[in-house]
Amino acid sequence: MLDFLQLGIRKEINHTLQSIGIVAPTPIQERTIPSVLEGKDVIAKAQTGTGKTLAFVLPILEKIDVHKSDVQALILTPTRELAQQISKEIKRMVENVEGINVLAVYGGQDVKHQLNKLKGATHIVVATPGRLLDHIRRETIDLTKIQMLVLDEADQMLHMGFLPEVDDIIHETLSSRQTMLFSATISKEIKSLAKKYMVEPEFVEVKAKKVTVEEIKQVVIETTDRRKQATLLHLIQEHRPFLAIIFCRTKIRAKKLHEALIAGGYESDELHSDLSQAKRERAMKRFREAKTQVLVATDVAARGLDVEGVTHVYNYDIPHDVESYVHRIGRTGRAGGDGVAFTLMAPKDLDFLRMIEKGINQELEIQVIKGVSIPDREDYPRANREQSKKAKRSEGRRRDGRNVATPSSSRKPNNRRTKGNSGTTTKGRKRTR
């Protein structure tokens, strides 16, 4: 198998990849990077979780000329969350490379703040179509020197109705640009777009990895935000994991949880973007050598983190997208080993649980720890709670002049758990199809 150096990636970036546990390219990276470096147009059909972001980010970084202040690469994405994610990935990859500047442009940001950032040299712009067009009309972003254009999640972009905006943006660029199109599906609209704007594109197709493996047992623990920390500490005490990764949604929550674990006497470390590269490398080294038992991390660390011997993954905060969930739980049960992933779910997280189950095509087992994850008095089947709320709603009862709300994510009663002894995990019955 080829490594990143053999694919043409410089040693400084390869060092960064290794420091976060990425030592070998995925199939889509192995097949796409050489074609992009050669200047070819590329159509890549790849599902979430195949490593497609680095498949275009890494060769783009190799081709940027830091001596020019023009915008040389444009990456279009359908959502601001994806724009943020890609720009963070780029910034992480250039930590050991001087001179490459990236700017994320998306709605919801202060326009003046973005304008101030654009006054300096910007080599790569990661943008959503609407906000980018706003800058084009203001003449604050010049795309006439664009050499590389990426349409990421192209099918989702068209599904969201961005085709007119994409057309307008591409017309602002030179026809001599290199175009890369990444999409999970290749529809008639995608083919038409490719025919219109691409020159003899090379087609790359990579089948998605199986999102869940049999060796990983997935369990959802029902709890509340107030009881999350105590529930997690109880689980760690009960499981005694050899190596565990705990994922938090933000770096602030990761830092607070890490401090709580240290105070509880656990060998813990933290991994998030507030730490310097040297500190992150030291944390990873200690964890790989099993000098620390627990690693508290944000989703940044979920990308490509590969450590042998991770027996448990804990989702302290439930992921807000399926891709993040897949990346997180994939950190355990590697190399054919057994693994288990626990997700702590508060009532407000029900919609995210349903989204995850739909995305992985699997219904997850729900458990409750009586007297720990929820109070004893609340320990009765969710089905009964939902039936009670439905009954109240049907009777037309009102609170503060409004109908009593029923959770949008309520499910059919199925007795998913039964009562158990205090302090023990009460297992629910898995649903069958």
Image (cartoon, helix red, strand yellow):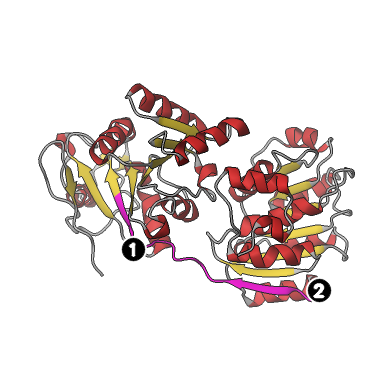
Whether residue 165 is visible here, answered yes or no, is no
Mark 1 — residue?
A: 214
| Residue 195 in the image: above or below residue 106 | below
Q: In the image, which disc is placed on residue 199?
A: 2
Residue 112 falls left or right of residue 221: right
60 in magenta: no
Whether residue 205 is visible here, answered yes or no, is yes
* Residue stretch in magenta: 199-219
206 in magenta: yes
| Residue 402 in the image: above or below residue 36 | above
Judge depth for marks 2 and 1 and give the one in front.
Answer: 1
Q: CA distance from mark 2 to mark 1?
A: 43 Å
Asked if the residue under mark 1 is in contact with the one under mark 2, i.e. CB atoms within 8 Å, the reply is no
Which residue sits furthest left? 421
Residue pictured at 51% horizontal, 67% vertical: 208
Residue pictured at 61% horizontal, 31% vertical: 278
**Is the C terminus in the top left, top right, bottom left or bottom right quadrant?**
bottom left
